[in-house]
Image (cartoon, rainbow, N blue to C red):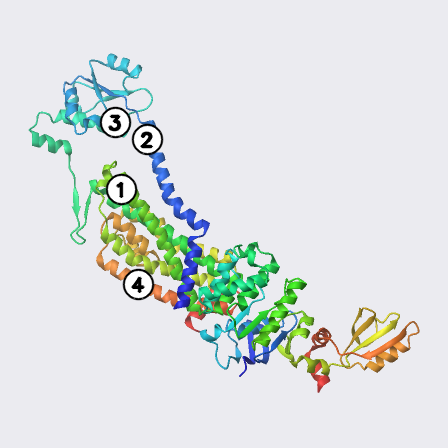
Amino acid sequence: MHAVRVSHVAKSFGSTHAVVDVSFDVEPGEIFGLLGPNGAGKTTTIRMMLDIFRPDAGTVSIFGGKLDLAKKRRIGYMPEDRGLYKDLKLEPTLVYLATLKGLDKRTARSRLGEWLERFDLAEHRQKKVQELSSGMQQKAQIIATLLHDPDLIVADEPFAGLDPVNTRLVKQILEEQRQAGKSILMSTHQMYQVEALCDRIILIDEGRTVLYGAVDEIKRSFAGNAVVIEGQGDFTHIPGVLETRKHNDAWHVALEIGTDPQAVFRTLAARESIKIERFELAEPSLDDIFINVVQNGAAKLEANHA
Amino acid sequence: MRSLWLVAKHEYRRTVLRRAFVLVTLAIPLGMVALIALAISVAMMSENNLPVGYVDKAGILDVTRHATLPNADERIEVRAFPDEEAALAALELEEIQAFFVFPSDYPNTLETDLYYLEEPPSNDVWGDFSSFVRVNLVATYPAEVRNRLFEGPNITVHDIVSNREFSESSMINVILPFVATFFFFVATMSASGYMLQVVAKEKENRTMEIMITSVTPGQLIGGKTVGLLAAALTQLSIYVIAAVVGLIVAAPRVEALQQLTVPWAYLGVMALFFFPAYALVGAVMVAIGGAVTKVQEGQQVAGILNLFFMAPVFLLTVIFKNPAAPVVVFLTLFPTTAFMTISLRWGLGTVPLWQIGVSWVLLVATTILMVWAAARIFRAGMLRYGQPLNLKTAVAVIRGD
C-alpha cells in the first residue's frame, strides 16, 4: 500500500494556477524528494496532501484512503515557516502538540527528554520559543514533527537554518526513520541533500510534473549532458554550455539539452589557448539536472526525450 | 472530544497566564477600590465639621431639639446667636462655618439668609440643618403626626408583572445591574478580542497548519471557544468575589448597602443570555480571524463590528429616558445588543417577559447560525491561504456556492 498517492491534483487561487497537474506516490521506507523552483507549487501540493487545501481536481490518498483524524495522527508535518507558539515555553509547547497527536502526557514528556538531549536543547526546555535562535527553533520544529513517532513525515525545508553539525544530525535521523520503515516526503532546495538522501524525486515546475522517478535512473538518463574537464586555460564561454563551474582542479561543464559532448570537445580542441589534460562524460549532479530542466523548460525536455 | 478538551485546556491556561489578562483581571477591582478610597478620602479631607449658627428672629427654633434628631451625635452641631453681629463675629473667628438668619416673617415667606466666608456648607450640612429646622417646625404636632411629617414620604413602586419593588431606599438594587453590565462587557470584549488575535495570529504564523493536521477545524474552534469562555468566567468570578468581599466589608459602614438584596432573577436571566451572547461574539471573531491574513486587518474589522454589540452604550440616554421606547425594544430583541440592553433596562424597571423570551430565542438562533457560518468562513479562509476573504466571497461561502 502506498503511504501517499497524489493523482493529477490541480489548485488555482483566483486567476493564478498554483498547481496544474501533479501526480506521485510515496512508498513506505523511502525518502521522497519534492523539488522545484520557487513558486513551482511544492508547498501548495503538500497542503493539498494534508487537507489544508482541497484540490480543485484530482485525488489524494493517504495510507490507502481519505485523510481522517486517525490518519492525521500518523503524520508528522513540518511546515516551511516554523509553526510553533512563539510566546510559550519550549517543553510545554512540544508536549501539547504531541498530546494532540494522541500521545499521553507522560509518554510525551519521556520521549521529549531524549529528543531534547539528542538535539542539545535540554537546557533550553523552559525558554520561550521566541528566545531560541533560528537554528534551535528549527530543531524544536523537527522534534515536534517526530515526537509522536509518525509513519509519514512531511518536511518542508528541514535543513533551513541548520549549521553543518545539525544538518548531519538531521540527515542521520531521517535515515534512521527510513530504516524504521517510515515514509518521508521532503521538500528542499538543497540538491546535494536530495542526492545524498532521496530514493526517488519529483520535480515540478509551473505546477506540472517535469521529472519523476528514482534518483539513479534520472541521473543516468541525463548522463552525457555534462562533462568534466581538466587542463589549462579558460573553459568558459563555450557554445551549447549551460553552466561552467570549477571544483578543485576540474571544470564541471553542464551542457544544454541537445548539445553533443563531441562538439564541445572539438570546439575546445580548436582553441590554441587551451590545453586539455582530461575530458570525460560526467554523470550530472541533481543540481545540474534541476537547472537544466527548469531553464530549458518542460516542453524542450519532452521534445528531447521523445 | 479529547482533542477538543486538550485545545480548551491549553487555550485556558495560555489566556489566564497572560500578563495582560492578569493585569485586567486585577486592575479593575483594585482600580474601583482605589477610586472609592480616593473619593472617600477627598470627601473626608474637604469636610467641614465646624458648627452651623443661626439667628432666629421668628422665634421658631429651639436648639435643645437638636438632641431629639435620630443619630444626633453624628449630625453637624448647631448654635444659636442673638443677632447677626454675634454670629458674624463667630464666623470670622472660624468658630462656625456659616449661619442662617430667619427673619420674623419666616413662617409666611419660608425664606432665610445664609452667610458664609468662602465655601458654602456641603449637602450633608444642609441636610442636617434642614432636619433641625423640620423637627422644630413640627414640634407642636402630636407625636405620630410629627414623626410622619419628619420622615417624609417613601414611595415604593410594586411591579405586578415581575413582582419587583423599586424604592428610594433600595437604589443600590437599581445601580447594581449597571455595574454588572460594565463587568460583563469588559470580560466578554477582552476575551473575544483575544479570540480574534489568537485565530488571526496562528493563521499568520502558520501554527494553524500544524494544528489543522492534528485536529479537525471543529475541535480547534470549539476548544478555543470553550477555553476562552472558561477564562472569561474566571475573570467574572474574580470580579464577583471581589464585589462580594467589598460589600461584606463596606455594608456595616454604608447604610445604602444594607438595603442590597441578591438579585437572583436578574442573575438568572443574565446567565441565560451571557453564554449565547459570548458564543456569538466568539463566533464573529473566529469568522473575522479566519477571513483575514493579518492580525491588524482583523482588529480593524472587529472594531467596526463591535459597534453592533456596544450600541446600547451609545444610546444610554435614550434607554434612561424611556426604557420602553420602540428603539429600546428593538435593541432588546436584536441579538447583538440584547444582552446589554436587557441588563441596563433591568435596573430601570421591568422588561416584559415576552421581550425576554423572544430576544433569547432570536439570540440563540443567531448564535447557532453564526457558529455554523464562522466554521465555514474559517475553513474557507484556510483554503485561501495568503489571500483575505472579502465580504462577497464570505457570503458565497456561507451560501455554499
Q: According to the image, label 3 marks what residue?
A: B125
Q: Amino acid at mark 2?
A: Ala
Q: Amino acid at mark 3?
A: Val
Measured as percent of width and height from the top left, residue A119 is found at 59, 62
Q: Residues within 10 Å of mark 1 (few under 14, many from 20)?
A: few
Q: According to the image, label 1 marks what residue?
A: B248
Dot placed on the residue nearer the N-terminal end, 2 or 4: 2
Dots 2 and 4 on the same chain: yes
Label 2's element?
helix
Give the residue at the far left of this rendering: B142
Q: Chain of mark 3?
A: B
Which quadrant would residue B337 be assigned to in this image?
Answer: bottom left
Q: Chain of mark 2?
A: B
Judge depth for marks 2 and 3 and give the one in front: 2
For the point 26% across and 56% down, which residue is it? B269
Judge depth for marks 2 and 1 and give the one in front: 1
Distance in Å between CA atoms under marks 3 and 1:
28 Å
Dots 3 and 1 on the same chain: yes
Distance in Å between CA atoms under marks 4 and 3:
52 Å
Q: Amino acid at mark 1?
A: Ile
Dots 2 and 1 on the same chain: yes
Measured as percent of width and height from the top left, residue A244 is found at 80, 71
Measured as percent of width and height from the top left, residue B361 is found at 28, 63
Distance in Å between CA atoms under marks 2 and 4:
47 Å
Give the residue at the far bottom of this rendering: A306
Q: Amino acid at mark 4?
A: Leu
For the point 20% across and 40% down, which residue is it? B169
Q: Chain of mark 4?
A: B
Numbered circle sitting on residue B43: 2
Q: Residues within 10 Å of mark 2 (few under 14, many from 20)?
A: few
Label 4's element?
helix
Q: Chain of mark 1?
A: B
